[in-house]
Image (spheres, grey):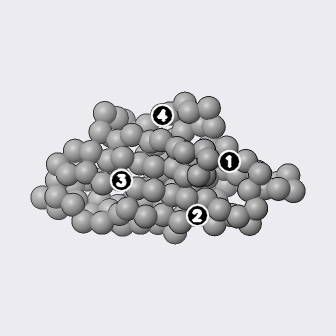
Amino acid sequence: QVQLVESGGGLVQAGGSLRLSCAASGSIFSINAMGWYRQAPGKQRELVAHITSGGGTNYADSVKGRFTISRENNKNTVYLQMNSLKREDTAVYYCNVGATLLWGTASDYWGQGTQVTVSS
């Protein structure tokens, strides 16, 4: 149906930057909202950033001013530019995509997750 491939995670020093990408493919008619979530050890998964099909965005308070979400509709891809990274940003990051399939059904899909580790 829909496959999501994430890339861009890794190890970075505090204050550094990373850019995550998530590309959707499969039996897609249209992509609706896209977002990034993260889950740190022992914590619940939380929303990091969200972007609508029209380009409207919202962010978790903890990342406002440091992270930027964007999308390339012709590539069915969502990005998360992360600047001024802090140790508390360490987590597994998951992309989430709302898609309508060719036969009309709509659902949310999750990426496999990519590890982001910020060292001091």
> As shown in the figure, which amino acid type bears the numbered disc 3?
Arg
> Looking at the picture, does residue 33 appear above or below residue 90?
above
Using a 10 Å C-alpha cutoff, classify the residue at mark 4 as few (fewer than 14 neighbours), some (14 to 19) or many (20 or more): some
- Residue 45 in view in this figure: no
Measured in 3D between alpha carbons, the distance from the residue under mark 4 to the one under mark 3, in whole angstroms, is: 18 Å
Q: Is residue 30 visible?
A: yes
**In-front residue for pair 29/46:** 29
Amino acid type of disc 2? Leu
Q: Marks 2 and 3, how far apart in space?
A: 16 Å
Which residue is tagged 4?
A: 58
Mark 2 vs mark 1: which is more N-terminal? Answer: 2
Q: Helix, strand or loop at disc 4?
A: strand
Name the residue beneath numbered marker 1.
31
Which quarter of the image is occupied by the C terminus?
bottom left
Q: Which mark is residue 14?
A: none
First reached walking from the N terminus: tag 4 or tag 2: 2
Which quadrant would the N terminus be assigned to in this image? bottom right
Which residue position holds label 2?
4
Does residue 78 appear to the left or right of 62 in the view shown?
right
N-terminal label among 3 and 1: 3
**Cα–Cα gap, marks 2 and 1:** 12 Å
Q: Pointer 4 and pointer 2: residues touching (CB < 8 Å)?
A: no
* CB contact under 8 Å: marks 4 and 3: no
Q: Residue furthest right?
A: 103
Labels 1 & 4 near each other (Cβ < 8 A): no
Cβ atoms at labels 2 and 3 below 8 Å apart: no
For residue 19, the mark is 3
Disc nearer the start of the sequence (2/3): 2
Where's residue 82, x and y in %?
32, 47
